[in-house]
Amino acid sequence: MMAATHRLGGLAAGVAMAGLLQADLYETGIVVAGAILGSLLPDIDNPHSSISRRWQLTSFFITLGQGIIRLFSKLLPRKQTGYINSMIGHRGITHSFMAVCLLPVPVILLGRASGYLNAGIYGAVGIAAGILSHILFDMLAGGAPLFMPFTTKRIVIAKIKTGGLLEWIFRGFLIVIFLYFGMEGIAWQELLQV
Ligand SMILES: [Zn+2]
C-alpha cells in the first residue's frame, strides 16, 4: 500500500485507540502522533520508503547494518542465510508482532527518563497501534511475517494492488472509521470548556 494509505491507517488507529482509552485531548494528541509515526515505521527496512527518505541517517545505518549482517550470514549454511536475509530484508522482522511489542519500548524509557512517563506510555501505545495497522495493511496487500522470528511465513489476507482501485476504496473506508471515532471518541467538549 502507498505511504499515504498507511498514514491514514495510523490516523484512524490512533483516533480509535484514544477513544478506547478515553484519553483527554492532550493524551489523544500524543497517541495519534505516535500512531502516525508507527504506521510508517516498519518500512524503515526499505531504503526507498517514505520514512527512510525522511530519516536518511537512520536509514543509512540500517542499510549498512543489513549489508554487514548479509555478508556475515554467507558464512552460515544456506538455510540459515535465507532465514536471516528474510528477517532483515524488506517486510521482515519490523513487520511482526515482535516489532509491535519491542519498537515502542524506547519511547516508554525515554518518557520515564525525562519525567514524562505518562506521555511516554501514551506515545508507545500509539506507536504500537500504528505498527499494527501497518502490518494489517501489508497483510491485505500481499502478506507480512506476523510470527517472525518463529517462522518466516508471510500471513496473507488479500492481495490488494498498490495504487489500484481497491486501495482507494479502502482509503474511503479508513476515512469513515476516522470520522466515526473522531466524533465519538475524542473529548472535544474539553476544548469547549476551556
Ligand atoms: Zn510495510
Image (tube, rainbow, N blue to C red):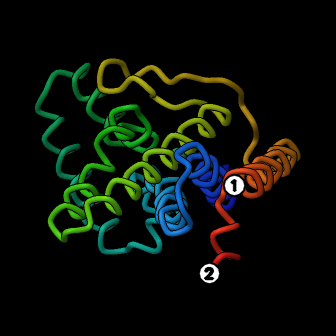
Where's the C terminus, which quadrant?
bottom right
Residue positioned 39% across, 72% down in the render: 55
Q: Residue 82 shows which numbered tag?
A: none
Q: Earlier in the sequence, mark 2 or mark 1?
A: 1
* Residue matched to label 2: 194
* Residue matched to label 1: 5
Q: What element carries label 2?
A: loop
Q: Say how many tags the image has.
A: 2
Measuring from the top left, give residue 192's x and y in whole percent: 70, 76
Q: Give neighbour class at mark 1: few <14, some 14-19, many 20+ (Cα, 10 Å).
A: many
Name the residue type under label 1: Thr
Residue positioned 39% across, 38% down in the render: 92
In terms of image quadrants, where is residue 77? top left
On screen, residue 117 versus residue 194, left or right, reads left
- Identify which residue, 6 or 64, lies in the foreground: 6
Measuring from the top left, give residue 147's x and y in whole percent: 39, 23
Note whether 143 is above or below 55 in the view shown: above
Residue positioned 19% across, 71% down in the render: 114
Measuring from the top left, give residue 26's x and y in whole percent: 50, 69
